Image (cartoon, helix red, strand yellow):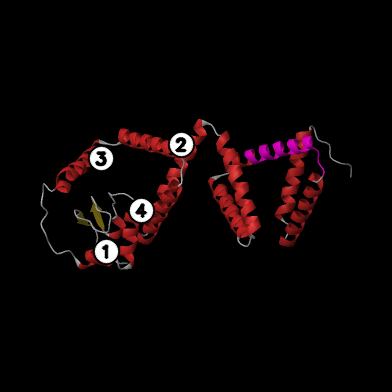
Amino acid sequence: MPPKKYNSEEERKAAAAASRRNARQHETADQRAARLLRNAETYRSRIANETAEHHAARLQREAEAKRLKLDSETEDQRAARLLRNAETYRSRIANETAEHHAARLQREAEAKRLKLDSETADQRAARLLRNAETYRSRIANETAEHHAARLLRNAETYRSRIANETAEHHAARLQREAEAKRLKLDSETADQRAARHQHRKFSACCHKGKIDLPVQDYPEYLETLMNGVDHNSKILWKILDLTIAHWHLHPWGLTLLHLQDMDHTASVFTVKYIIELEHFTQ
């Protein structure tokens, strides 16, 4: 039977692709594994001795093909792809040696640096927005234990990062923090501004002894929290030692405001009960 004639090269390629798809739909698992192995061997042998020009052209073709494939995938396909990639990544690094681990971290850091250096202002803004959304969704439903552990890690990381910073880095950090504070103040609502001013008024009067708070017996579990002995209390004081005042510890069932004297005594504070002891002590 003579070979079929096609009107164009595009028509021939489309027919060949359709034939391949039809064949793959009926192949067994062993046939698929054998085909993938043959393809991998063919690919390796083809690129083993390619010239620099062919190498650059191949990378460009593969990047374009990947971009077209990603642009056309559905939400379900994207979710499945990300899941497969995550599983593949975890299985690959599960038993890597210390040498391979160090080399991988170096490659990933270099790739990340190159990617960040080449991104546009719009790409950077979109990336920061995605990161913020991911962070918010991750901490939205965290448990009290995870919440405390995260605060502790953040405080440790911050303290270790600034411990040996140079004068130049110190000045740059202060400038960034001042800019972040200014942006936060500029974007706050009227209610947030009023609450912030109310906190300031409290500090200006109660902290200076202008108002005497009534002395009363604290609940037993609150005294336990502040004694620095049991597990939850140690976590709380560790966080307070590493950070500044104004902690809102809602997952622990109470809010501590205006903590001062960070040598394990809080001379003035307000306690707001939010949930029951049974939930707090879980």
Which stretch appears magenta? 49-67
Q: Which mark is residue 168?
A: 2
How far is disc 2 from disc 1 in space, using C-alphas?
40 Å
Give how far across and how far down residue 204 sits, in percent: 17, 42
Query: Is residue 56 inside the magenta stretch?
Result: yes
How far is disc 3 from disc 4 in space, using C-alphas?
26 Å
Asked if residue 141 shows in the view, the reply is: no
First of labels 2, 4 by sequence position = 2
Which amino acid, by three-letter code, is at mark 2? Answer: Glu
Provide the residue designation for mark 4.
Answer: 242
How far is disc 3 from disc 2 in space, using C-alphas?
34 Å
Provide the residue designation for mark 1.
Answer: 225
Q: Is residue 145 left or right of residue 24?
A: left
Mark 4 in CB contact with mark 1 (< 8 angstroms): no
Report crowding for label 4: few under 14, some 14 to 19, many 20 or more residues within 10 A (C-alpha). some
Nearest-to-viewer mark from 3 and 1: 1
Q: Which mark is residue 192?
A: 3
Q: Secondary structure at mark 3?
A: helix
First of labels 2, 1 by sequence position = 2
Identify the image quadrant of the N terminus. Answer: top right
Which amino acid, by three-letter code, is at mark 3? Answer: Gln
